[in-house]
Image (cartoon, rainbow, N blue to C red):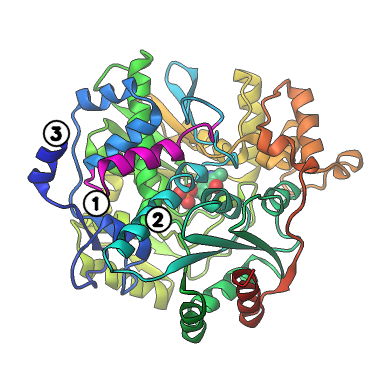
Amino acid sequence: MSQRTDRAAAFGQNLYLDTRGAIDAPVPFTEAVVDGLAAGGGLYVPQELPSMTIEEIVALAELPYAQRAAAIYKAFNVDLPDGVIDELMARAYGDNFDDEAVCPITSLDESTHILELWHGPTSAFKDMALQCLPHFFSASAQQLRDQGKLGHEFMILVATSGDTGKAALEGFKGVDGVSIGVLFPDGGVSDIQRKQMVTTTGDNVQVWAVRGNFDDCQTGVKRTFSDADFANALLDEHAIALSSANSINWGRLLPQVVYYISSYAELVAAGKIAAGAEIDVCVPTGNFGNILAAWYAKQIGVPIGMLLCASNDNRVLTDFINSGTYDISDRPFVLTASPSMDILVSSNLERQLFELTGRDGDAIRQWMTDLAEKRCFRVDAATFAKVRENFSADSIDNATCLATIKAVLDEYDYLIDPHTAVAYAAAQNLRGENPVLIASTAHWAKFGDNVYRALHALAPAAALPDETAQLTGCQLNERIAEETDKHDIPAGLANLDAMEVRFTDTIDGNVEAIEAAARAFLAR
Ligand SMILES: *Cc1c(COP(=O)(O)O)cnc(C)c1O
């Protein structure tokens, strides 16, 4: 308690700046979380970063995970009462995770450690943030209402190509003052992903299949967000505002900083590294959120050497880290075996560049304008040198990804998903002397079809053989479990075929259809 007061006195209330220097005055955590994106299009970053000594970091290992997370939020001077932070963290990281450690580490050998970020309800790493953010979003909104700064509640709208939708549904279901609607492309997600979404329980959730592809979904949702008449009508009729709670929200990033600090403490407590010894961290990267969180952990005091950025064939980040130029002007969007990393515009890179330029909002604004207008920007030499100091990067193609799944199973009797395989393969290419912590971002059973291809030496996009092609996603996973003797399929994935389908609506992807569906849901 007194330590908290000291820290608060040392840097006062920790406010949030925006990366484009556009907002009038910095805002507290609660407002940054409820706003999501700053006015002017920038992203929020904390004015002050706490610093932790090695002793303080290592001591976290004595606490349960929820209390480690609470301690780190308090170190950031989150403007909610300490008791509230404790209570929200206990809810975020409790028995909704199937491992007491929340994100346990499996060590393949003395210097290769796998951080398993997929023990949450949807079996992918987005749970680490989305089991936490909704509680803080709801409590922040409540506090702002109590302060008279906010008069409405929220509806979250999410367009998803797979993982994010289910993680958001699970995170927001049952949360006060918020409802959530998710749109996915009809026929454009896997059997497992669709069943995960349409069987979601809870009164404040809704799921729609959309006629069209993911782009149609996303465009429809974006147009809905920018329809001012619709926004006013929702406020008038329901006292509801739309929000996206997407991965640029600071409230999704901070929970990810937590697990990098926590896992260093774990490695020391388990005797796997000496306190103070450097590790490298390798992250399968899409929107740059997860690897940025590791960079923040490094600033706070975790002895991290290099950050190894792993890309799939959508290698814009790898090319940027190796050249200083971010160029999507002539870059095709490729469908890969690791779909959650299929991305061209990596939004959280903006935060990283803001930090590496010494928080130069003018430079960021210019680069983001270049990106929007010329589909390309190039950072200055000093910033590029900083990038090179912190990051190295490699891209892994589909065939190598699948071969890596097989190789790791053969060598270590450990089954990984395609995203983790991209990181594992990149780490092999990039690692130096330091031990490596590899972020494992999904359970293998979320991507059973590609795991099956890997185990049977099928080409990345090959059709599955007839007898397996007819199986449901769950049945295919059982087949893999038998073949590999890996019977750890999480309950949330194993039981999907038996669960009641609650959502069967298919709608058009245009803005009128989405708005009509949203209204019908709110009028329920
Ligand atoms: C979202 C996701 C990623 C990419 O993480 P970023 O924070 O966007 O870089 C990697 N793997 C899986 C399984 C994901 O769902």
* The magenta segment: 76-97
- Mark number, residue 3: 3
* Element assignment for label 3: helix
The quadrant in which the N terminus is found is top left
Q: Are marks 1 and 2 in contact (CB under 8 Å)?
A: no
Q: Residue at x 71, y 45 (%)?
A: 460
Q: Which residue is mark 2?
A: 137
- The amino acid at mark 1 is Asp
Q: Which of disc 3 and disc 1 is earlier in sequence?
A: 3
Instruction: Check if residue 150 falls in the magenta segment.
Output: no
Q: Residue at x 34, y 27 (%)?
A: 264
Q: Amino acid at mark 3?
A: Gln
Q: Earlier in the sequence, mark 3 or mark 2?
A: 3
Q: Residue at x 86, y 44 (%)?
A: 469
Which residue occupies the foreground of this view, 274 or 502? 502
Instruction: Say which residue label 1 marks.
Output: 79
In the rendered image, is residue 25 in sight? yes
The answer to whether mark 1 and mark 3 are in CB contact below 8 A is: no
Percent x, y for residue 217? 63, 69
Q: Position of residue 104 (x, y in %)?
A: 48, 26
Between the residue at mark 3 and the residue at mark 2, the CA separation in whole angstroms equals: 26 Å
